[in-house]
Image (cartoon, helix red, strand yellow):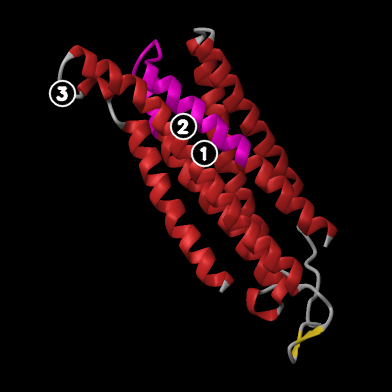
Amino acid sequence: MNLIVAAVALLAGIFVWWLAVRGLTTKSWEAQGTYDGRDAAGMAGPAAARIGLWVFLAVVSSFFALFITAYLMRMSPAVVKGVDLRDWRPVAEPGILWVNTALLVAGSLGMQLASSALGRGKFELANLGMLAGGFCAIAFLAGQWLAWHQLQAAGYYAASNPANAFFYVLTGLHGLHLLGGLFVWGRAASRMSRGRTATAATRQSVELCTVYWHYLLVVWLVLFGLLLTT
């Protein structure tokens, strides 16, 4: 039953994410109709994009909550309904995960700098923060891949131990969500690179990307703390 709920949550999340991306990339000034219609579209677009993002984050939170619950249940050292669950062997977390955590924190700070700088009209500083946010996110993903490589080199394969499998699943899901965020980040960064001032659409994209970066940082801190303590 949990797998069915997780699958439905994932599909719903993908759909809402697609709606959010359309809201971020739609040019409201190209809407047809009267001036009042264009003004209404300009007002409704940002609100729809924000709502879409928050709904998506709620779905993703439920998705991760299901996996965390399954993780805690699976590591229980007992026999449940005739199934022996005492095969759990803790994973030795690679030290590079600390570096990756610092990179994600730096990326979140960079995105916050970009969003704040755009609000103050400091376009160059916003560009710098935007690049820092994207670079740190890419470096984080590269670091996660290196952590996987180190674990496999040490013999921690996914099929050999349920704890190993959960490590790859949890970190992999988080990485996929960050990779999806980089797609929207790339569009916003491309807009900023083509001009000397920020449009309303660009400011909105940066603002929502910043919220998403903060959210993924919080999710990673929860996952990392869970892995360290269990």
What segment carries the magenta color? 187-215
Can residue 218 be seen here? The reply is yes
On the image, the x and y values in percent for residue 111 come to 57, 27
The kind of secondary structure the magenta stretch mainly shows is: helix
On the image, the x and y values in percent for residue 37 come to 22, 19
Which quarter of the figure is the N terminus placed in? Answer: bottom right
Give the CA separation, mark 2 to mark 1. Answer: 6 Å
> Taking 225 as reference, is 204 above or below it?
above
Residue at 49% x, 7% y: name it.
121
- Amino acid at pointer 2: Arg
Give the CA separation, mark 1 to mark 3. Answer: 28 Å
Magenta stretch encompasses residue 208: yes
Left-right relation of 168 to 194: right
> Taking 13 as reference, is 202 above or below it?
above
Q: Residue furthest top?
A: 121
Which is more N-terminal, label 3 or label 1? 3
Left-right relation of 74 to 169: right
Give the CA separation, mark 3 to mark 2. Answer: 23 Å
Number of callouts: 3
58, 151: nearer the viewer: 58
Specify few, some or many for label 2: CA neighbours under 10 Å numbering under 14, 14-19, or 20 or more.
Answer: some
Location of mark 2 (residue): 50
Magenta stretch encompasses residue 131: no
- Amino acid at pointer 1: Trp
Q: Are marks 2 and 1 in contact (CB under 8 Å)?
A: yes
Q: Residue furthest bottom?
A: 82
- Amino acid at pointer 3: Gln
Using the rendered view, name the quadrant where residue 78 is placed: bottom right
Q: Are marks 1 and 3 in contact (CB under 8 Å)?
A: no
Location of mark 3 (residue): 32
Residue 54 is marked as 1
